[in-house]
Amino acid sequence: MISLGHLKHRLGQYGALWVGSFLLSGVGVWLAALFLDLIDAADLVLPAAMLGVLLALGGGLIASLMSKQTPGTKLAVLLLAVLLVLPLLWAPVSAAVLIAFLADRSIEYSEAYAAFQIGVARLLFPISEAVGDGDLLGGVWTAFQWISSVVGFLSALTNIWPFVKRLLGPEPAEV
């Protein structure tokens, strides 16, 4: 038996982690770029942000595995963590990409960005080789970026929407 309540709670935490890491790394890169070159700022902030994401993801996973949940729930949480690790790591990177885009700069010279892209390519290349002839890597990378961004946005939206509804006030009563 799988506890859907626990999975929903954990997905909410993943969404909050995505939004938080996106916002914190975006603000961090932007503030550091006030004093450093943008590339140096990204190289300073991104490793710390990605480490924070991994620690938070690992902490949530360990908490679930140590809880009194059923083995099926624990397995489902483990599978979710494996599936969402790359989208969660993409959040701080995408914030740095956005800051670079707004500054009309290229982020590709950042060592942290390049290391992330190379690491993802090393993971995705064998998959694209198995599925196709290896030329799929560019398409798989682009799909990864889009899917990660959409997953993060939808996750953020589902977590923020109840707060927005409370800000807008109660629904008008029907007469």
Image (tube, helix red, strand yellow):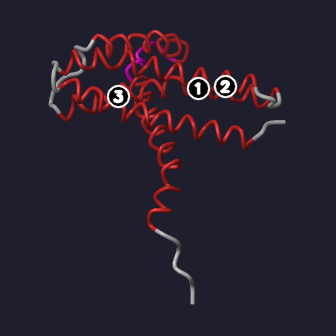
Q: Which mark is residue 104?
A: none
Q: Main secondary structure of the magenta part?
A: loop
Would residue 20 appear left or right of 78 to someone viewing this image? left
Q: Few, some or many C-alpha atoms within 10 Å of disc 2 (few <14, some 14-19, many ≥20)?
A: few
Q: Residue at x 83, y 30 (%)?
A: 70
Instruction: Name the residue carrying label 1.
Output: 83
Q: Amino acid at mark 1?
A: Leu
Secondary structure type for disc 2: helix
| Whole-percent x, y for residue 92 in the image | 38, 27
Instruction: Name the residue carrying label 3.
Output: 25
Relative to 117, say whether 164 is above or below.
below
Q: Quadrant of residue 137?
A: top left
| Whole-percent x, y for residue 125 in the image | 47, 12
Q: Amino acid at mark 2?
A: Leu
Secondary structure type for disc 3: helix
> Does the magenta-highlighted stretch encompass residue 88?
no
Secondary structure type for disc 1: helix
Q: Are marks 2 and 1 in contact (CB under 8 Å)?
A: yes
Frontmost residue, 136 versus 165: 165
Q: Which residue is at the far bottom? A: 175
Q: Are marks 3 and 1 in contact (CB under 8 Å)?
A: no
Would residue 19 appear left or right of 2 to someone viewing this image? left
- Label 2 and label 3: CA atoms lie apart by 26 Å
Instruction: Name the residue carrying label 2.
Output: 79
Q: Residue at x 49, y 55 (%)?
A: 163
N-terminal of the pair, mark 3 or mark 1, is 3
The magenta span reads 132-138
